[in-house]
Image (spheres, helix red, strand yellow):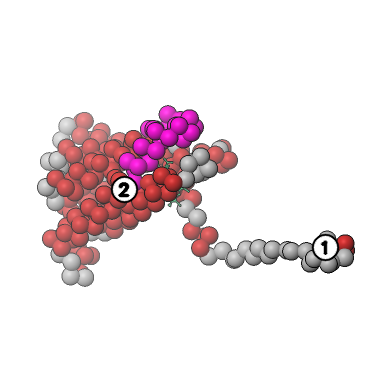
Amino acid sequence: MDLAHILAFTVFPYMCLATFVLGHSYRYITDRYHWNARSSEFLEKRSLFAGSVIFHWGIILTFFGHAGGMLVPQRYFDLVGIDDQAHLAIAHWSGLAVGIAAFVGIVLLLWRRLTHPRVRAVSTINDTITVFGLLFVITTGLFNVLFGDHNVLYTVAPWIRGIVTFTPDAALMQGVPISFQLHVTAAWALLAFSPFSRLVHIWSAPVFYLFRRRVLFRRHVAPARATPDARRI
Ligand code: HEM
């Protein structure tokens, strides 16, 4: 194993993870006012709705698919009767569906950002890098699903588990096709970029909103013949 391989598949992931953790902590402490999705809904609604809904469903389900499929070792799937062939088939078809959704959504969002005059006027270089970065990661991922004839269950999956459990083994990534290597490397880079972009909003998903107490709004209509005192109530 040469030095470049170790740098790419052990050192680089940890550099990205460290930037991810420290960067988010620093930004949260120092720049909480700008910790948001920088919504542009008030400038243009229609194409945002289509692009954003399709993209968010696709990318969030992709995220859970990656976590479930990669971080859980195959032996646990075997226990519930899902052998590696069934696992790969489930990953392939579900990955294809959510990957296509994420791809179509991000293309719509990119098209809106580049062509809508008002959205374009408020877009920063950072926004463009974010959307192109996502497009690259999603496109390489989709390419792997469609054309990457490679069983990741015994290479990329244990490699990622090794990274997150602090037992890295870059040798597992040897012989993995270049399109998979590009996909994972771009994904690490995007994680490292996240604290410096609007992607920070991901980590503030409003889940508590679902459980919070309801806020009641009552319409007060002053009675037609009310006295001046009653109208003030
Ligand atoms: C965790 C749940 C998430 C919530 C609640 C959420 C919510 C939002 C909201 C409210 C916007 C602003 C839309 C507007 O302009 O009005 C937005 C934009 C965006 N989100 Fe998310 N998001 C989530 C997850 C993600 C994930 C996982 C990614 C990508 C990895 C992502 C990437 C983006 C991008 C790139 C935009 C900007 C789109 C554009 O205006 O071009 N989001 N999100």
Instruction: Report the quarter where the N terminus lies.
Output: top left
Q: Which mark sits nearer the N-terminus, 1 or 2?
A: 2
Q: Secondary structure at mark 2?
A: helix
Q: Secondary structure at mark 1?
A: helix
Q: Magenta span: helix, strand or loop, mainly?
A: helix
Q: Is residue 14 visible?
A: no
> Residue at position x 83%, y 67% from top?
225
Residue 102's label in the rendered image is 2
- Report the mark closest to the observer, 1 or 2: 1
Kindly indicate whether the residue at mark 2 contacts the one at mark 1 (C-beta within 8 angstroms): no
Left or right of 31 in this view: 65 = left
Instruction: Choose between 5 and 123: the one closer to the eye.
Output: 123
> Residue at position x 29%, y 45% from top?
103
Please provide the residue range marked out in magenta.
105-129
Residue 115 percent location from the top left of the image: 39, 33
The answer to which image quadrant residue 134 occupies is: top left
Quote the CA–CA distance across marks 1 and 2: 53 Å
Residue 199 percent location from the top left of the image: 43, 42
Q: Is residue 182 visible?
A: yes
Residue 64 percent location from the top left of the image: 33, 56
Q: Amino acid at mark 2?
A: Ala
Q: Is residue 122 within the magenta segment?
A: yes
Instruction: Report the quarter where the C terminus lies.
Output: bottom right
Q: Amino acid at mark 1?
A: Arg
Q: Which residue is mark 1?
A: 231
> Residue at position x 36%, y 37% from top?
111
> Residue at position x 30%, y 46% from top?
104
Residue 183's label in the rendered image is none
- CA neighbours of label 1 inside 10 A, class few (<14), some (14 to 19), many (20+): few
